[in-house]
Amino acid sequence: MAAIYPDLKNRVVLVTGGGSGIGEAIVRQFAAQRAKVAFIDIAIEPSRALVRELTEAGTPAHFEPCDLTDIPALQRSVAAVRKLLGPIGVLVNNAAHDERHATEEVTEAQWDSRIAVNLKHQFFCAQAVIPDMKAAGGGSIINLGSISWIIGQGGMAGYTASKSAVLGLTRSLARDFGPYGIRVNAVAPGWIMTRRQLEKWITPESEAQIMARQCLKRALQPEEVAKFIVFLASEEASACTNQHYIVDGGWV
């Protein structure tokens, strides 16, 4: 059974990319805490299905459909969550897209799209919720990175460049807004067995590579990342900020 953090009950939590994968697990974990959870995603049907399931279970969540690369639309979605649920106390910048791409074939437009989908929205989401957190005297922002850039993974330079930049963004925001009680941390997952990973990238060869490199010789699940993120959002982690936490089964 997962730990329960009483301070998260009725806390307004916003998760980006919450309709599937690690984001879905994060939404589920915050809903189990009885937080007021909202999530933003571009995938309509899976997101609506998640809301129906959680509502039927008595732990409802709110879904805002939005393309996070459209910054004005993102800002409107954050405003809609605030209007419906109240000031936002926790932001989890989870949304990303780890599409592989050959360096020789990347155009300027494709490069810009990788930055937009993996990094740019994290800044503008944080910008949109910081006034709520300043007014409340505190809050928690958790930015999802990746171990891909740490281990020097190739074949996805736009993705790894974006994910390495998440750490710089995190530390800048933590320094600027710590005086207001706002904690900002980064979490770098390893190779987590989401449906997307299983369908697109997991082969007998890649699975053997994972088992060779991880200290833990087993598959890592989305909820293992989600549970750590919930902890970071809670007051149990009240002195944790400006940090980069790796959840990878001991790969790095």
Image (cartoon, grey):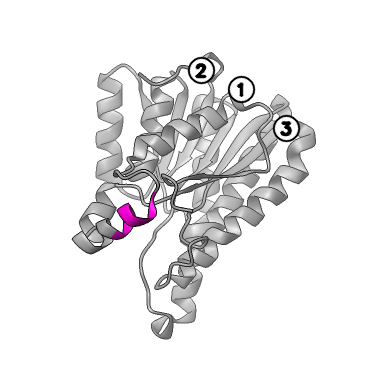
Mark before the other along the chain sequence, 2 or 3: 2
Q: Quadrant of residue 101?
A: bottom left
Q: Main secondary structure of the magenta part?
A: helix
Q: Look at 26% across and 28% down and name the residue there.
A: 52
The residue wearing badge 1 is 235
Mark before the other along the chain sequence, 1 or 2: 2
Look at discs 2 and 3 and give the one toward the viewer: 2
Q: Amino acid at mark 3?
A: Lys
| Cα gap from disc 1 to disc 2, whole angstroms | 8 Å
- Residue 213 magenta-drawn? yes
Mark before the other along the chain sequence, 3 or 1: 3
Q: Position of residue 127 (x, y in %)?
A: 65, 46
The residue wearing badge 3 is 134
Q: Look at 59% across and 22% down and name the residue there.
A: 236
Which range is magenta? 209-214
The image shows residue 21, relative to residue 113, as above or below, that is: above
Q: Amino acid at mark 2?
A: Tyr
Q: Position of residue 27 (x, y in %)?
A: 39, 33
Q: Position of residue 117 (x, y in %)?
A: 46, 60
- Residue 116 magenta-drawn? no
